[in-house]
Image (cartoon, rainbow, N blue to C red):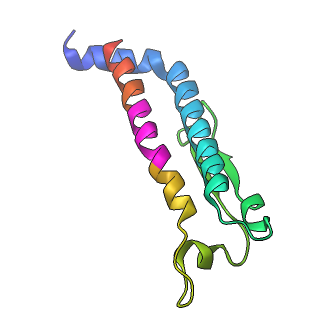
């Protein structure tokens, strides 16, 4: 058995556990981004902050697992990106900047676990 065959066997055996771990990683990273976005969102009435929610697609056995978070009010784009009269307040970009490196490091560690057997 060559290295490629061993890797394929390792990946087949890791499927269920890896799916659960990836699902957990996507979920926790999305919720952490939501939490940081809410903390950094500017507050006048609180509507913008309270509109930040998360949605998830796929489960541990799915081919695709995704999470999305962000505000859902009519003016969120203008607060986040700014206007000709107001500077940008990129609260969601800031949240993503915090979470993204942690997500990639954790995903890399999961990949390493599969390769290490």
Give the percent coordinates (x, y) of residue 78: 60, 79
- In the visual, does 5 lie left or right of 88? left
Q: Residue furthest left?
A: 2
Vertical placement of 114 versus 86: above or below? Answer: above
Above or below, comparing residue 24 to residue 82 in the picture: above
Q: Is residue 99 magenta?
A: yes
Which residue sits furthest bottom?
Answer: 84
Say which residue appears at 55% left-offset and 86% top-offset: 83
Residue 80 point in image, percent of width and height: 57, 71
Q: Relative to 21, is 99 above or below?
A: below
Residue 56 at x, y percent in the picture: 66, 46
Quarter placement of the C terminus? top left
| Most foreground residue, 107 or 8 | 107
Residue located 27% across and 16% down the image: 5
| Residue 111, percent from left and from top | 37, 27
Quarter of the image with the N terminus is top left
**Which segment did they paint magenta?**
98-107
Using the image as rendered, state which of residue 3 and residue 53 is in the foreground: 53
The single residue placed furthest to the top in the displayed view is 1
In the picture, residue 115 is in which quadrant?
top left
Q: Nearer the viewer, residue 78 or 61?
A: 78
Q: How many tags in the picture?
A: 0
Q: Tell me which residue sits at (80%, 69%) in the image.
A: 45
**Would you say the magenta stretch is mainly helix, strand or loop?**
helix
- Residue occupying the point 55% across, 70% down: 89
In the image, taking residue 66 as reference, residue 97 lies left or right, namely left
Q: Is residue 104 magenta?
A: yes
């Amino acid at each position: 058995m060559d290295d490629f065959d061993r890797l394929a066997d390792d990946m087949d055996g890791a499927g269920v556990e890896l799916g659960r771990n990836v699902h957990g990683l996507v979920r926790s990273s999305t919720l952490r981004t939501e939490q940081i976005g809410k903390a950094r969102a500017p507050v006048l009435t609180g509507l913008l902050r309270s509109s930040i929610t998360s949605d998830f697609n796929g489960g541990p056995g799915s081919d695709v697992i995704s999470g999305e978070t962000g505000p859902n009010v009519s003016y969120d784009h203008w607060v986040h990106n700014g206007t000709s009269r107001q500077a940008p307040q990129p609260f969601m970009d800031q949240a993503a900047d915090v979470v993204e490196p942690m997500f990639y490091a954790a995903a890399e560690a999961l990949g390493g676990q599969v390769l290490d057997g």
